[in-house]
Amino acid sequence: MHTNPTPTDDSRGAVTDSELIIQALAAGRNKRVRKLMTRLHPAKIAALIERLDDERRDALWQQVAPERETAILHHLRPGLRERLRRQAAEDAANEPREPQHDEPKGHRGKAKQNANHLQDVRDALADGKLKRVGKLLQQTHPAKVAGLLEALPPEERTVVWSMVETERAGKVLTYLHEDVCASLARDLDPDELVASVQTLELDDLVDLIQDLPHELGAQLRAAAGASRRKQLDELLSYPEDSAGGLMNADVIEVRAKLRIGTVMRYLRLLETLPPQTDMLMVVDRQGIYQGVLRLSALVTTDFSARVSDVMHTDVRPIPVQTPDVDVARQFEDHDLLSAPVIDDEGRLLGRITVDDVVDLIREDSERAVMNMAGLDQEADMFAPVLTSSRRRAVWLGINLATAFLAAWVIGLFQATLQQVVALAVLMPIVASMGGIAGSQTLTLVIRGLALGQIQPGNVRLLLTRELGISALNGVLWAIVIALLAVVWFDSWTLGIILGAAILINLLSAAFAGLSIPLLLHRAGIDPALAGSVVLTTVTDVVGFFAFLGLATLWLV
């Protein structure tokens, strides 16, 4: 048995820490376990390990930092020491490899890596090897850690989240969807949550506060220092979907009269530049924006020249209240890496960087896809069943109402259907063709609205174009389907009726596909959210009414 003396710190305090570790271990709060163990001498940790049963002992050993293993093993009794040493050796042998530079770069290669990474984490969880999980997470970019967490069911997600180091947890939270972010933030102790955001850029912290429930966001704001809190309050005062909501205050300002050499010496004193810095902002004494000094010009200009000699005045600033979709469009149109943001008086407030615009575009595209299925709030695919059921029930109810409307139209022609049974066989073709044609126009118009390409002056031209396309396709496919119906049912009359109904439905689908999103947009409703539901109703009702109405006139 070892003869090293144990530390002489207060035994009551040490026992208290040990009990807190046991409680945190039972609650699955692994971050807290690791934090508490940093306060204990290796001998005290060894004594705690020897007190526990095998299951809790293995769980606690998985939270021991690798650099402390040797010191703790030294204080254990020989049999247990050898057992844990072998376990440590096995963990080291199975340690995840560092990613190699020659690994596949394409989308398929990345997808395969992500899938393998998820499987590696799940295998490690199944084996109870949480140290291996922690090392995998440490080697992974926070954005990919967020994706991995969202791909796990809630029970496994909680365990994996507990293995994310506190100093990286804040960055991971910024990449999570709102529901998952709030859930995992609540799993952190208040002091852990505050500590996790200390290294975040100001704009990331603002985004995180806006995504979190009010009480957690207020907690982060209150924990910030006075100067940082003032900046937070200013940024939080702007609407989330505006240039102010995207803006970061980490801007470097210079005066036009300064010499280039003076600016270079100033930058050297800073040691590091804010991320995505491609230009410095030129302002006057009152902070009024005057132009930009690009870094490319700064490093290639003689030190004796003045900023006013090489600054660019053609970079247009973005007003702070500009909608975020317009900001994204400006970045796309002008290939910007960053852009200055000003208030109504022209005073420089901050800047917007391309990384935030890319995040905005990605979020908007995801939201549009989810909205089309009525799942705008269901970003977590493992959300509780009751919550998801309640959210989806609304859209199922709306769909039921529209289905009853289509069924009511069919019921008007019940006598016709009883006399000509073939009509029931052919009805779905009419509705399906109209639905596809309408969705094509609907998608085109929604995209045009998002990009600002549809204006009052070109709506008539676009309608003429879409009606022309539908007329040509309608004639073509009406002839094809009519001939197929003649061959199938040996009735020229039925074929002509089917062809005419398809032509009518395709023309109405084009008109509806254009007008519906425009009307919804004017009413302040997201066309991606409600457009497809309304369009389906129109094409079904018009298709059934045209087909069965013509059949009633000609066949009955």
Image (tube, rainbow, N blue to C red):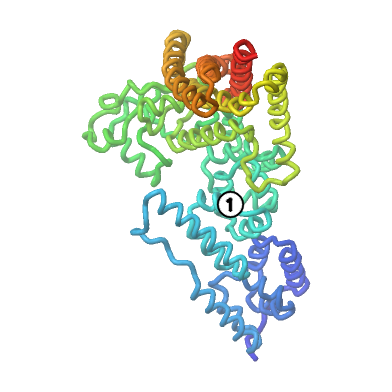
Q: Position of residue 56 (x, y in %)?
A: 71, 73
Q: Secondary structure at mark 1?
A: loop
118 is higher (above) or lower (below) than 81: above
Judge whether residue 19 can be spotted in this image. yes
Q: Position of residue 196 (x, y in %)?
A: 59, 51
Local packing at callout 1 (Cα closer than 10 Å; few below 14, some 14-19, many 20+) is some
Residue at horizontal 49%, vertical 60%? 116
The quarter of the image holding the C terminus is top right
Q: Determine the image quadrant of residue 548.
A: top right
Tell me: 479 left or right of 555: left
* Number of numbered callouts drawn: 1
Disc 1 residue type (three-letter): Ala
Query: In the image as oriented, which residue stretches furthest toward the bottom?
Result: 1
Q: Position of residue 47 (x, y in %)?
A: 70, 79
Q: Position of residue 12 (x, y in %)?
A: 78, 72
Mark 1 highlights which residue? 151
Which is nearer the eye, 120 or 270? 120
Tell me: 78 left or right of 273: right
519 is higher (above) or lower (below) than 22: above
Residue at horizontal 67%, vertical 53%? 154
Residue at horizontal 43%, vertical 27%? 340
Residue at horizontal 72%, vertical 18%? 415
Query: In the image as oriented, which residue stretches furthest toward the left?
Result: 302
